[in-house]
Amino acid sequence: MFKNTPFEAIAKTMSESAPKFNPASMQDAIKPAQDNLKAWADLAKNQAKEAQAALAETVASIKDIKDPQTAFEIMKASAEAGMAMFAKNLKEATSLSVGQFHTTVDAVEKSHPAPEAFASIAKNLKAAATTAETTLDSVMEKSAAAMASVAPASKAKKTR
């Protein structure tokens, strides 16, 4: 019935494996991916709510302003708050990514045919991810400090 073509080999494997299919074990195998997707969806939802609230606050505070300088100061404060929110959101996303990466490496190590042989690789992979996260945090903090220390340029008087 089956010949030696790739499609027929796959069909044969599927037909032989069908009676062994266990929906409960399949659900258990998919659960970590579902949990990861839910964590990302929750993070995105929370960050979107936070951004929407910040924008609504800025619009409400600037709505009845007549003085341009006051409006400028409000927009400046809003931009600074937006940058702080961006940094916080990036840090949260990085933390979630690294945490999920560590969990995935742990799962691979657990299911590896020779976990003791994979252990040092797993340790190095997780250390590299943690180092990347720490480096990003450090760069973000240094950038924020540098931005805070920059004084606005003074207005030069025009001479004709």
Image (cartoon, grey):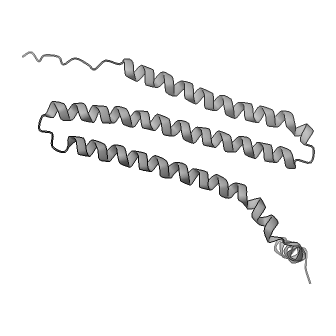
Q: Which quadrant of the figure has residue 37?
A: bottom right
**From the viewer's perspective, is residue 127 above or below residue 150?**
below
Which image quarter holds the C terminus?
top left
Q: Is residue 85 left or right of residue 122?
A: left
Q: Look at 37% across and 34% down and name the residue there.
A: 81
Residue 14 location in percent, x, y? 84, 74
Residue 52 location in percent, x, y? 37, 49
Q: Is residue 140 left or right of residue 68?
A: right
Q: In this view, does 33 lie to the left or right of 109?
A: left
Residue that lies at the very extreme toward the left in this rendered image? 160
Which image quarter holds the N terminus?
bottom right
Q: Which quadrant of the figure has residue 120?
A: top right
Q: Look at 70% across and 43% down and name the residue there.
A: 101
Q: Which of 95 and 64 is in front in this view?
A: 64
**From the viewer's perspective, is residue 45 above or below residue 70?**
below
Q: Which of 10 and 76 is in front in this view?
A: 76
Q: Look at 78% across and 65% down and name the residue there.
A: 26
Q: Look at 90% across and 42% down and name the residue there.
A: 115
**From the viewer's perspective, is residue 105 above or below residue 124?**
below
Residue 38 location in percent, x, y? 60, 55
